[in-house]
Amino acid sequence: MIKKKVLVVIPARAGSKRIPNKNIRNFFGKPLIAYSIEQALSVSFADRIIVDTDSPKIAKVAEKYGAEVPFLRPARLATDKASANDALLYLLLKLKKEENYFPDYVLYLQTTSPLRELKDIEDCWNLIKQTDADTTLTICPTHPRLYYLDDKKNIVLVNRPKKISSNVQDWRPAYILNGCFVYIVKTSAFLREKSVITKNTKAVICEKWRSVDLDNPEDWALAEILYKNKKSVADRIKKI
């Protein structure tokens, strides 16, 4: 049986405004990006590990910890409004053109999930291999009563059941993308749909407390507490 090529892509653009230098900021003794790189190096089925960045400084740190940075992302794909899908498409097409390298799967790991575990990655890999999914990703539970505000500041219930009950158990469970810890997508499906989240996407459910996404200082402070105490938190949850 021919081994499938699995490319690990770790996106890490510069210019984070809410948490300056987020990707290389010190998190318990080493740059935040180091955690994702070291975790990727532990993935037995990974073929290559590439950090996709526009920053020479981030590239230098990434290479120090064992990742490849074959080229820098162009500035037009490194703005706040740039699409992650467009950046990944650029990376894949450039690898195909310059190196004739074309992976069967892309394993997409965000740097902003320090509480991700190797098992989360393995569970997504097993799910995509054992089913007809084109994408597998991780999600976490959220409260079933989901709302948004319309243009007039009216609160609108999103997850509206046929019969609204005050009992949470009567509501259909709801989930949100958790950062996302992990995405695995078949490259052919991504190129066809130009999206990591494809029409045929299946999910692995992760614990809510581990699903911290470092987007603002509040998230960072919370992640530090959880990471430092993750064993005791996990043990405490089991005892309740």
Image: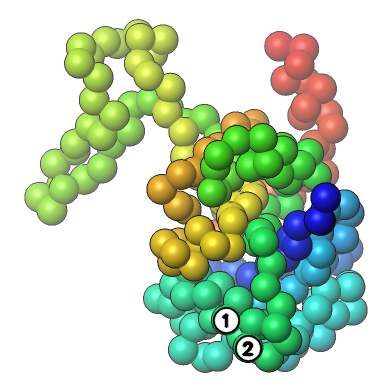
Which disc is residue 20 wearing? none
The residue at the far left in this view is 152
| Residue 77 in picture, x, y percent from top left | 49, 83
Give the residue drawn at x 68%, y 41%. 129
Give the residue drawn at x 44%, y 64%. 192
Which disc is residue 97 wearing? 2
| Residue 151 in picture, x, y percent from top left | 13, 53
The residue at the far front in this view is 1
Is there CB contact under 8 Å for labels 2 and 1?
Answer: yes
Picture colour scheme: rainbow
Left or right: 94 in relation to 200:
right
172 or 24, which is in the foreground? 172
- Figure check: 130 above or below 78: above
Which disc is residue 93 wearing? 1
Left or right: 214 in relation to 42:
left
Q: Secondary structure at mark 2?
A: helix
Report crowding for label 1: few under 14, some 14 to 19, many 20 or more residues within 10 A (C-alpha): some
Quadrant position of residue 230? top right
Give the residue drawn at x 67%, y 53%. 113
Asked whether residue 211 appears in the rendered view, the answer is: no
Question: What amino acid does circle 1 point to?
Answer: Leu
69 or 212, which is in the foreground? 69
Left or right: 173 in relation to 163:
right
